[in-house]
Amino acid sequence: MSTEVHEGQILAGKFRIERVLGRGGMGIVVAATHLQLDERVALKFLLPEALINPEAVERFAREARAAVKIKSEHVARVSDVGTLESGSPYMVMEYLHGEDLAGWVRRNGAMPMADAIEFLLQACEAIAEAHALGIVHRDLKPANLFVTRRVDGSPCIKVLDFGISKVTVPGVAPEFGMTKTSTVMGSPLYMSPEQMSSSRDVDLRTDIWALGVILYESLTGRVPFEAETMPQLCGMILQDPPRPIRELRPDLPQGLQHAVLRCLEKNRERRFNNVAELAYALAPFGQPAAQRSAERISRVLGAVGISSAPGAAVAASSRPGSGTNTNFGASTEAKKSRAPLVVALCALGALLGGAVLFLTHKTPALESVPEHPSVTPVAAAPAPSAPASPPAIEPQLPAPSATAAPTASAPSPAPSAVTPKTKAKAKAVTTTPKPVAAQPAAPAIDPLDGRR
């Protein structure tokens, strides 16, 4: 049976082929016009030689069922299915203008940070809805993210090809006949370590890994694991840390780098638990609408009981300067805040300082007052502002204002320095026996110590 299709050919009695959009080993996608609706559509159908493979036929039907259930604007809509005259099944999808993300990155190179995050968050919105339905994509890669335009001209990501998706809804029969434990399905550059070991034994966190690889490539123009042979690539993904992003994009915030590396943890238990946590971690580095996108994703998952922890996601990955400093894909816990310790130390220092000042101020008031005749040499110190300082420290110099009366300069500062408390203190001090003044250690006491 011929596998050739050509322009103007009529398929299923209502689709006129315009051109071939893509061809793979199992199927082909063409641009066509629906003759009754006069609407351009994309027509995808299996090649005749693929019909002998029951798994290929079942996967094709699965893709149609998965895509039609997801209502997000970020998934290519499927409007119809059928069978061609050749017996090949087909599906009718919306026709998209644009190019896939792989071609976009290849043509433009590394993307600006905000744009790369915006594209990935749009993909996360589609994947969140798929995960809410129990569907794991398992083949996320730039070639399956299509960049098109909305009516207003803004870019819109469409997730394609749910052909090897896995349904994890309770009650649905396991896919033992579809995917054997030893079968490896997907694109190796974007496959998680557990998917390389067994495509059947994966959960939604395998899509988290793939989204991390896609974001890494969008930001740097390179994939995190590069090898010359397939065995070498598999070994690197299973054992080696990814190349540090800072070597390729040192301008990126450290928090964003850690968020990407957390997606690439070898142990899936250490990755983000779901795409909502990933979205919350990326939102601080995206455009203003990024936070709203993360909230939508969280609501979609929350509606089916999948909880997300935005606080934990931000604390672990989004805060600049947090996370691991190693090259390995595992990002460690964020550094704990030292603010409580600093506050406690400051409070203790203030308490000790207050005690020292209290003792220091009290000692000159009781011991140096009788020796206040020595204030005169101190007043002659080179600092001309010394006589004016007593009014500023009223509580500490009760005695000088009382005992300095014999000097000519004492009366002027005394009125401003004397308060009810200082009067009481001065009265008490003046009654102190003068013989204390004869102590030989008196000249060594500086009356200004209390002021300092």
Image (tube, helix red, strand yellow):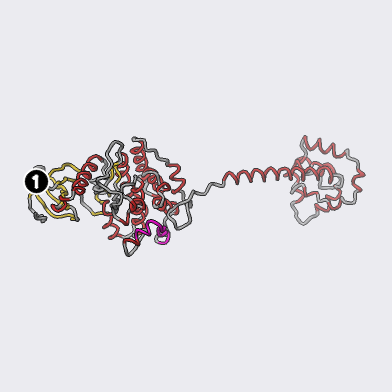
- Snapshot quadrant of residue 343: top right
* Residue denoted by label 1: 12
Relative vertical location of residue 110 with respect to residue 311 in this rendering, above or below: below
Region rendered in magenta? 233-247
x, y percent for residue 296 = 34, 40
Quarter the N terminus occupies = bottom left
x, y percent for residue 113 = 37, 54
- Snapshot quadrant of residue 14: top left
Q: Closest to the observer: 48 or 347?
A: 48
Tell me: 53 left or right of 216. left
Tell me: 371 left or right of 257. right
x, y percent for residue 17 = 10, 51
Circle 1 crowding by C-alpha within 10 Å: few under 14, some 14–19, many from 20: few
Tell me: 355 left or right of 9. right
Residue drawn at the location 31% of the way across and 37% of the way down:
170
Q: Closest to the observer: 249 or 353?
A: 249
Q: Main secondary structure of the magenta part?
A: helix
x, y percent for residue 317 = 44, 49
- Snapshot quadrant of residue 105: bottom left
Q: Closest to the observer: 315 or 250?
A: 315
The number of callouts visible is: 1
Q: Is residue 234 visible?
A: yes
Q: Is residue 158 visible?
A: no
Tell me the element at label 1: loop
Query: Tag 1: residue type?
Result: Ala
Membership of 234 in magenta stretch: yes
